[in-house]
Image: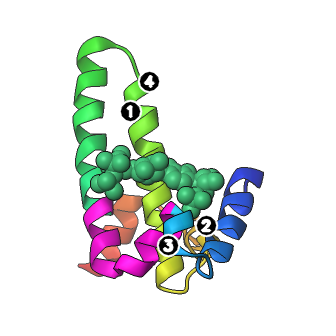
């Protein structure tokens, strides 16, 4: 796992015990899963818009910023559910070498 992801994961874990008025992450946990999912949905939408704008303008800076917001809120969601980012990385690692088309065919 990247150092950044590992470091952020540690901070997110610690924030589950923090006071809501001193931490944005703690305030999301205090508001509950629905609020966290609302943020994931909002950031997904903003990422899609930023990608369309990037295609038109040739400038990727906003799509990088919005993708960081999306990844961050997805990590808060996993943390709220008691999961670590390693679980997602392990799932991606499991898929190495498995073509998406072959995987889809195996389900049909
Ligand atoms: N990476 C992030 C991060 N990315 C985005 N955000 C926050 O996520 C929010 C994004 O929401 P929006 O863009 O919708 O802005 P908004 O309108 O203020 O949001 P709402 O009022 O709708 O909640 C902003 O408040 C950002 O500051 C983050 N907040 C925290 N982190 C990391 O989490 C750590 C712990 O943060 P605290 O819990 O606040 O100490 C920090 O040290 C950072 O490493």
The kind of secondary structure element at disc 4 is helix
The picture places residue 3, in percent across and down from the top left corner, at 77, 53
Quadrant where the C terminus lies? bottom left
The kind of secondary structure element at disc 2 is helix
Q: Is residue 93 above or below residue 71?
A: below
Q: Nearer the viewer, residue 1 or 102?
A: 1
The kind of secondary structure element at disc 3 is helix
Tell me if label 1 and label 4 are in contact, CB under 8 Å: yes
Q: Which mark is residue 89?
A: 2
Q: Nearer the viewer, residue 49 or 95?
A: 49
Task: Check disc 3 and report the residue beneath it.
Answer: 20
Q: Is mark 3 within 8 Å of ligand 1?
A: no
Q: Which mark is residue 61?
A: 4
Q: Of all residues shown, which one is farthest toward the right?
A: 3
Q: CA distance from mark 4 to mark 2?
A: 25 Å
Seen at 73% across and 62% down, the residue is 6
Q: Nearer the viewer, residue 106 or 46?
A: 46
Magenta stretch in the rendered image = 24-39
Which one is earlier in the sequence, the residue at label 1 or at label 3? 3
Q: Is residue 32 magenta?
A: yes
Q: Which corner quadrant of the image does residue 19 belong to?
A: bottom right
């Amino acid at each position: 796992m990247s150092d950044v992801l590992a470091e952020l994961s540690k901070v997110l874990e610690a924030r589950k015990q923090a006071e809501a008025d001193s931490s944005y992450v703690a305030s999301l946990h205090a508001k509950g899963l629905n609020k966290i999912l609302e943020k994931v949905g909002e950031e997904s939408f903003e990422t899609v818009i930023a990608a369309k704008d990037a295609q038109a303008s040739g400038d990727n800076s906003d799509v990088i910023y919005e993708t960081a917001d999306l990844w961050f809120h997805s990590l808060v969601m996993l943390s709220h559910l008691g999961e670590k980012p390693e679980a997602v990385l392990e799932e991606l690692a499991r898929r190495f070498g498995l073509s998406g088309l072959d995987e889809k065919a195996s389900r049909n």
